Image (cartoon, helix red, strand yellow):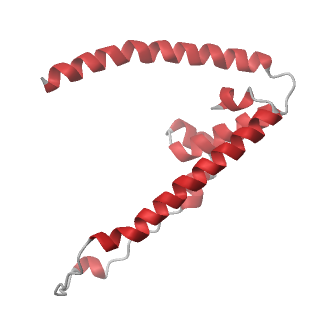
């Protein structure tokens, strides 16, 4: 993500943001409409109420802000907390758009991308063959 966004020009980044924003808005609209219309697909059931200890237990709160904006970004990167890693990568990639002397970093990141692609290529055929054998 860093190399992909960092290699863009301002015009390309603006076009990507416009098109990506439209797609994201359509996906959100579809998701919200699905969630709101889903209860209409089920019949209205009358159920008896009963006591359950889980009704009075406090559920732990979940902090979404710390999931996306952590206090320690290196902890999130080392523990692969995906939303924080994505937000960090997007910020670094967008910051690289305005830097004129970014060629060396982008070249090095390109080498890393190729190396990781080769490793993935080594792993993928092994997994695919093993999975095919497993399901036969």
Query: In this orientation, which residue lies closer to the viewer: 23 or 70?
Result: 23
Question: Residue 46's image quarter?
Answer: bottom left
Q: With respect to residue 48, does 21 lie above or below?
A: above
Q: Is residue 112 visible?
A: yes
The residue at the point 53 percent across, 36 percent down is: 78
Quadrant for the C terminus, please: top left
Query: In this orientation, which residue lies closer to the viewer: 35 or 81?
Result: 35
> Where residue 83 sits: x, y (%)?
55, 46
Quadrant for the N terminus, please: top right
Q: With respect to residue 120, does 70 lie above or below?
A: below
Left or right: 31, with 91 as reference point: left
Q: How many marks?
A: 0
> Where residue 32 sits: x, y (%)?
48, 64
> Looking at the image, which residue sits at the far right?
100
> Looking at the image, which residue sits at the far left?
136
Query: In this orientation, which residue lies closer to the viewer: 78 or 100?
Result: 100
Left or right: 23, with 50 as reference point: right
> Where residue 2 sits: x, y (%)?
67, 31
The residue at the point 15 percent across, 26 percent down is: 135
Q: With respect to residue 13, does 39 lie above or below?
A: below
Question: Residue 40's image quarter?
Answer: bottom left
The residue at the point 31 percent across, 82 percent down is: 56
> Where residue 126 sits: x, y (%)?
30, 15
Left or right: 2, with 10 as reference point: left
The residue at the point 70 percent across, 39 percent down is: 16
Left or right: 38, with 12 as reference point: left
Q: Can residue 75 be seen in this view?
A: no
């Amino acid at each position: 993500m860093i190399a992909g966004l960092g290699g863009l020009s301002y015009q390309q980044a603006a076009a990507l943001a416009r098109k990506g924003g439209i797609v994201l808005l359509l996906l959100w609209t579809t998701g919200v409409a699905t969630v709101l219309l889903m209860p209409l697909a089920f019949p209205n059931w009358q159920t008896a109420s009963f006591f359950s200890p889980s009704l009075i237990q406090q559920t732990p709160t979940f902090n979404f802000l710390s999931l996306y904006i952590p206090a320690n970004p290196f902890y999130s990167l080392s523990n692969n907390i995906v939303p924080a890693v994505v937000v960090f990568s997007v910020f670094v990639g967008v910051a690289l758009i305005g830097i004129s002397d970014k060629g060396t970093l982008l070249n090095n990141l390109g080498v890393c991308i190729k190396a990781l692609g080769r490793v993935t290529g080594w792993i993928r055929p092994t997994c695919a063959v093993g999975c095919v054998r497993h399901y036969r």
